[in-house]
Image (spheres, rainbow, N blue to C red):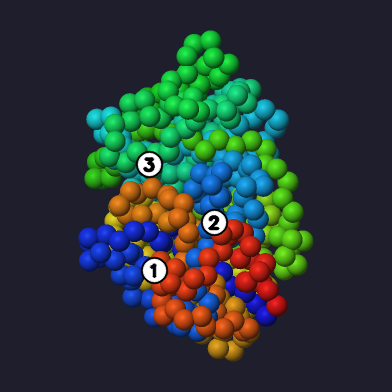
Amino acid sequence: MQYALVILDGASGCPVPEFGGRTSLEASRTPCLDHLAQTGITGLMQNVPPSKESGSDVACLSIMGYDPAAFDLGRGGIEAAALGICLEPGQVAFRLNLCYVEDGVMRGYSTDNISTEDGNALAAELKSALDSDTFTLYPGTSFRQVLVVNGHPELMGLAYATPHDNTGRDITAAYQPQLPGGGGIPEGHAAYEAAHALTGYIQAANKVLAASPLNARRVGAGLWPANHVWAFWPGMRPSSLVPFAQRHHKKAVVNSAVDLLKGLAFMTGMRYCEFAGVTDGPTNDFAAQGRGAISLLKEGNEVVIVHVEAPDAAGHDGRPDEKRNSIEQSDAHILAPLLEYARSHPLRIAVMPDHPTPLTTRKHSREPVPFVLAGPGVSHNGAQRMTEAQAGATGLLLAEGHTFMGSLFLAE
């Protein structure tokens, strides 16, 4: 038996007028997903516990079969691990976004999904100008960079807004660290100097970006410049996780284009594979990702996890047609090949979002997400489609999403 798990990041959400009062999943043409629902189990799973902020770090860890409430990883630490950064005691790693801000208003938390080539080139400019004993910048993928801060562990105790939650808003002070209950950090507070230093780095970085020749060329080409950095999601040296193979008695491989998934794979002892053309946004080559999944199955891998970032990016950007298209492309070019492979091989297929990213709010939310599981040993429980409403109507709710892996997906 082999197992394929497809995570459609942020694909679920709320009904929107653009789809006639339907959700993105309801409005999408998904014959392969429908077939899975009509032959397998459909239900809801709660991947984000009440104690955690909704995000892919928490939700994907849950899908992989780990209780996120039991681990305090910190997304910055996970993404640092993905880049091969071994954090020392006292070091804090932040996700650092390259953003586009116009007249003080956040226009693009991802600078319209800036290319990795341009993102890395801008990161090189920032490193050359600003790296020091305190701050070290590491280039990542697209708009995602990692900033390591040395000597200020107190930064972990502060609160940070996220850039994708501030689209269309004035961000004059929103990017600065806050007290956990909200509000600025007063002089004399234990974290005042650390927060002041981080804010100073951000402001200095913005000046470097304002003078960047690459940004000038982007403007000349009609592209948004990356003119603002935003530090958030702090993390320290990750806690030890039991390897996936030891926990579930199966070896797994992850197919994604996102540093977060790469970090989670490394931390849980899973192999990570990248395929040419697979990206974290609307430029994703869905067919290449589907071919990659099949090649991993043909290699004999027991569990293949395919993570598709595009629906989440479209949700954050508030683009209904793009979100629907990403779901339909996943169905046609990832699920269709998996179903064809399953015609001649014993294969269980599971599909689910990790968390909702509603088009109405452009933010992650924590509601349960629909899932479907089909294949050998799985019986149909009544649903015709994997949608929020039909999944809820089955009455099957996994209140702790981390139980899905062991109790349903890999259960003999």
Question: Mark 1: which secondary structure?
Answer: helix
Residue 198, can we see it? Answer: yes
Q: Earlier in the sequence, mark 1 or mark 2?
A: 2
What residue lies at 68% left-to-right and 51% top-to-bottom?
A: 267
Q: Residues within 10 Å of mark 2 (few under 14, many from 20)?
A: many
Whole-percent x and y of residue 406? 67, 67
Residue matched to label 1: 389
Residue appearing at x 52%, y 70% in the figure = 396
- Residue most extreme to the front: 395
**Residue wearing tag 3:** 165
| Residues tagged 1 and 2 counted as in contact (Cβ below 8 A) | no
Q: N-terminal of the two: label 2 or label 3?
A: 2
Q: Which sits in the foreground, 212 or 272?
A: 272
Residue 82 drawn at (x, y percent): 60, 48
Read off the residue under disc 2.
Answer: 47
Please state which of the two labelled residues, at mark 1 or mark 3, is closer to the viewer. 1
**In the displayed structure, would residue 278 be above or below residue 345?**
above
The quadrant where residue 310 appears:
bottom left
Q: Callout 3: 10 Å neighbours few (<14), some, many (20+)?
A: some
Residue at x-position 47% and y-position 66%: 370
N-terminal of the pair, mark 1 or mark 3, is 3
Relative image position of residue 284 (x, y in whole percent): 41, 62
Q: Residues within 10 Å of mark 1 (few under 14, many from 20)?
A: some
268 displayed left or right of 162: right
Q: Looking at the figure, which quarter contains the N terminus? A: bottom right
